[in-house]
Image (spheres, rainbow, N blue to C red):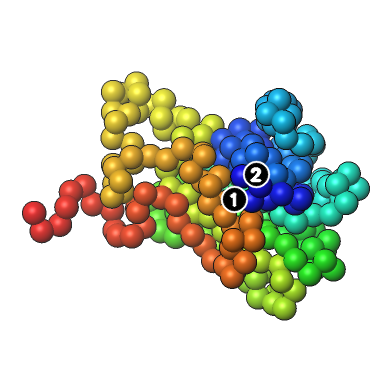
Amino acid sequence: MDRLKGKVAIVTGAASGIGRASSKLFAAEGAKVVCVDRAAGVEDTVKAIKEAGGTALAITGDASSEADVVKVVDTAVKEFGKLDIFYANAGISGGGQRPFFELDASEWRAVLEVNLIGVFLAIKHAARVMVPNKKGSIVCTASVAGIRSGAGGGPYSASKAGVINLTTTAANYLAGTNVRVNAICPGIIETGMTKPIFDYAKQRGTADKIGQLNPLKRYGVPEEIANMALFLASDEASYVNGQHIAVDGGLTSSMPVTGRIGR
């Protein structure tokens, strides 16, 4: 407990899934949390935090809108006096698993605006207030889809690869400021975004096979990603910077296989 005591955090995509789990965990560990989402469920996240004795504020906003990101950062500073952590978690799947050549440019733009440009805006405006304080942690949600093909649609995978590169680039742009930038690459996690995959598998009676390509032979839950976000946000990760860390049951430790090699 109290790993984030006295800190102020912003979490985007906080209405559900990884964002909600992270917001609740940050608050439980002592942070004052500004929860951001364009979905109304962000109010429910804040309600749950307050009922548990934590401090939180809900803002309805779009992570891909610079005006909204500026408002969120300025509100955090106005309400709580500073900003220590920005978890740029908001994301969309876009075209999903539709055939690559059936997608059009508008679908690509929509995904890139939220998943990649939204992360750029988070880093830009978080750094604006963190650098003068000479300390801060920016955490970004990337994906294993950004490391290798086969884990998501074209626009989604490209956007997450961009987040990984942006993380390393931003960490170096911020050299000497003591502001750290890191990314988490989740594997298959049961969230609202992946609900269609889970629903389809349940309909086919193959839900037990989800996640079977990783060495742990299972899928993950939002709280497991939130635990990594907590570590990267905390002072315990004071020497972790410019990294993309897979939290995927070991999926990216090897090329996916259905059985053990050499048996």
The residue sitting at the left extreme is: 263
Residue 29: mark: 2
Measuring from the top left, give residue 103's x and y in whole percent. 52, 45
Outermost residue to the right = 78
| In this view, 160 is above or below 127 | above
How far, Cα to Cα, is label 1 from label 2?
Answer: 9 Å
Residue at screen point 61% across, 33% down: 16
> Residue 246: horizontal and vertical position, in percent?
45, 56
Residue 50, quarter of picture: top right
Looking at numbered disc 2 in the image, what kind of residue is underneath it? Glu
> Relative to residue 183, is residue 81 drawn left or right?
right
Q: Nearer the viewer, residue 234 or 194?
A: 234
70 with respect to 193 (left or right): right
First in sequence: mark 1 or mark 2?
2
Kind of residue at disc 1:
Leu
Please give left or right for residue 249 compared with residue 61 in the image: left
Identified at 72% across, 78% down, the residue is 176
Tell me the element at label 1: helix
Are discs 1 and 2 less than 8 Å apart at CB? yes
Q: Quadrant of the C terminus?
A: bottom left
Q: Which corner quadrant holds the N terminus? A: top right
Q: Name the residue beneath numbered marker 1.
A: 230
Question: Does residue 143 show up?
Answer: no
Q: Residue at x 68, y 50 (%)?
A: 4
Q: Residue furthest top?
A: 203
Above or below for 110 versus 41: below
Identify the secondary structure beneath mark 2: loop
